[in-house]
Image (cartoon, helix red, strand yellow):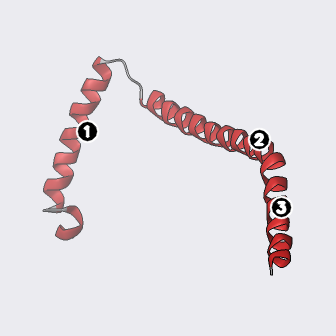
Amino acid sequence: MRRFFGGEPLGVILRLIILSIIVGVIFAALNIDPFDIVNWVQAFVTRIYNMGFDAIEFAWEYFLLGAVIVFPIWLISRLFARFGSRRAD
């Protein structure tokens, strides 16, 4: 148990209780509610999630826009390279 707790379990639990009270007093002085923190974390994760999919959508649109030009040019260059090398032989 000492290895898991990082010390004597009763001492660690007592330190965690005291630290929790100190942080609670600081948050109360700053008028921060525990539910505000939970809501902030939830909104933060939602914003990151939405931003990620928006970025993927923008990247997909740019890919399609570029692919309309790049892939046909690549295909034509490959065809000319293949047929051009046979004529040279």
Residue 17 appears left or right of 84: left
Give the CA separation, mark 3 to mark 1.
65 Å
Q: Which mark is residue 75?
A: 3
Location of the N terminus by quadrant is bottom left
Q: Which residue is mark 1?
A: 20
Identify which amino acid the numbered label 1 is placed on: Ser
- The outermost residue toward the front is 88
Q: Position of residue 89 (x, y in %)?
A: 80, 81
Nearest to N terminus: mark 3 or mark 2 = 2
Q: Position of residue 35 (x, y in %)?
A: 47, 30
- The outermost residue toward the bottom is 89
Classify mark 2: helix, strand or loop.
Answer: helix
Q: Nearer the viewer, mark 3 or mark 1?
A: 3
User: In the image, what residue occupies the spot 38% across and 23% down?
Assistant: 32
Whether the residues at callouts 3 and 1 have beta carbons within 8 Å, the answer is no
User: In the image, what residue occupies the spot 62% across and 36% down?
Assistant: 51
Identify which amino acid the numbered label 2 is placed on: Glu
Give the CA separation, mark 3 to mark 2.
21 Å
Q: Which mark is residue 61?
A: 2
Classify mark 1: helix, strand or loop.
Answer: helix
Nearest to N terminus: mark 2 or mark 1 = 1
Q: Nearer the viewer, mark 3 or mark 2?
A: 3
Residue 57 appears left or right of 19: right
Q: Position of residue 62 (x, y in %)?
A: 73, 41
Give the CA separation, mark 2 to mark 1.
49 Å
